[in-house]
Image: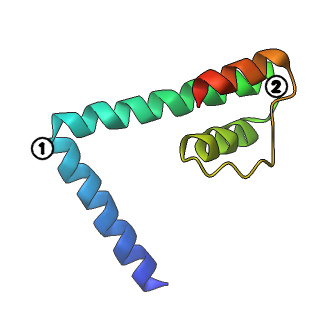
Amino acid sequence: MLPVFVILRRFVRAIVAAWRSDAEFRVLLALVVSLLVSGTTFFTFAENWSVLDAFYFSVTTLTTVGFGDPAPTTALGKIFTILYI
């Protein structure tokens, strides 16, 4: 279990170092966060999914994994997903 914490600590330090030194990284991170928040918000209200399900779908869609577990059922949800992808 200790190696997991060591790797996590290195990862957090790398994120902090990149945040402090690279403006492009800050913009990219802000873009990813805004996409995840907007997708989660939309799917929560338009598809009546829980926040966790909506966030899960947003992450799997943005990372192009696309397991297909949840899928939009409304026309508005399907249109938004096409634009979101």
Q: Residue at x 78, y 15 (%)?
A: 76
Q: Is residue 79 left or right of residue 64?
A: right
| Residue 11 in which image quadrant | bottom left
Q: Amino acid at mark 1?
A: Ser
Is residue 76 or residue 9 the one in the foreground? Answer: 76
* Vertical position of residue 17 compared to residue 22: above or below: below
- The circle on residue 21 is 1
Q: Is residue 82 above or below residue 68?
A: above
Which residue is denoted by mark 2 in the rendering? 47
Residue 66 in picture, x, y percent from top left: 68, 48
At label 2, the amino acid type is: Glu
SS label for mark 1: helix
Circle 2 SS class: loop
Q: Residues within 10 Å of mark 1 (few under 14, many from 20)?
A: few
The C terminus - image quarter: top right
Of all residues, the one furthest to the left in this rendering is 21
Left or right: where does residue 83 sit relative to residue 54? Answer: left
Give the residue at x 68% y 20%. 80
Residue pictured at 57% horizontal, 24% vertical:
38
Q: Image quadrant of residue 23?
A: top left
